[in-house]
Image (spheres, rainbow, N blue to C red):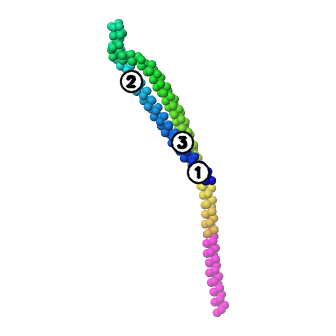
Amino acid sequence: MVEELKSIEEVEITSKITTHDELINLGRQLQKKDTDDKLKIDEYNNIIKNILEFNNINEYWINIFKTHKQLHILRSDDSFNKFINILLDFPKYIELSEYYITNNLKEIDQLKEDKAELDEQLENEIDENEEKDNLIKELKNNITILKTDINDYWKPRVEKLRNKCICKNNSISFLKKGLFVSSLFTMILIIFYVTKYTT
């Protein structure tokens, strides 16, 4: 018995340690995912910023291409290098966009599942409340029936028993009074006859 208790305690301790370690691992994984997501968001925002700048300088580059026939002259221009970097960032932009679209779709699916769970819980709660309401109505109905039974069955019985008791008490009272009167009358007669015959 003592060994079993120790083994149960050991199992509980081991379980607590394992749970603690797994929670730490889960925290690390969530932190790593958050860090990766933040880096991707920053990278995505930088690409968007560059694309917006590209929209601003787009007309400028169209005019330069029309006027300059030789591209090697343009290589030294900083805005041209920005333009090339923007063009080079497009595949990364598309990849990041797909990543965010996929994540957003996963989040939407998760939200739909959560909504379905909440709807189901709400429906269960509503059903449970309806059951409780029905139980309350049934109990109220039973109380009403019991009151009716008391009024219909017990009250007349108690009234009848009460009337019988009153009637018996009246009879007993009448008999007591009759006994008293007859005893008194008997005593008077005895005294009258004793005095009449003894004198």
Residue 97 percent location from the top left of the image: 45, 23
Residue located at (63% from left, 59% from top)? 157
Q: Amino acid at mark 2?
A: Asn
Span of residues in magenta: 170-199
Q: Secondary structure at mark 2?
A: helix
Residue 151, position as x, y percentages in the image: 59, 55
* Foreground residue among 140 and 104: 104
Does 41 sit above or below residue 142?
Answer: above
Q: Earlier in the sequence, mark 3 or mark 1?
A: 1
Figure check: 130 above or below 171 = above
Residues at marks 2 and 3, CA–CA distance in whole angstroms: 42 Å
Q: Position of residue 130 (x, y in %)?
A: 56, 41
Residue 178 position by quadrant: bottom right
Count of numbered badges drawn on the protein: 3
Q: Which residue is mark 1?
A: 6
The residue tagged 3 is 18
For the residues labelled 2 and 1, the Cα–Cα distance comes to 60 Å
Instruction: For mark 1, give the secondary structure.
Output: helix
The amino acid type found where label 3 is placed reads: Thr
Q: Residues within 10 Å of mark 3 (few under 14, many from 20)?
A: few
Amino acid type, residue under disc 1 in the picture: Lys
* Mark 3–mark 1 distance (CA, rounded to whole Å): 18 Å
Residues at marks 2 and 3 touching, judged by CB atoms closer than 8 Å: no
**Nearer to me, 134 or 101:** 101
Q: Answer whether residue 66 is visible to the viewer in this image.
A: no
Q: What secondary structure prevails in the magenta region?
A: helix
Q: Which residue is mark 2?
A: 46
* Sequence-first disc among 2 and 1: 1
Residue 23 is covered by the magenta coloring: no
Residue 187 pos. (x, y %): 63, 83
Please give the name of the residue rendered at 37% of the width and 22% of the height, measured from the top-left corner: 49
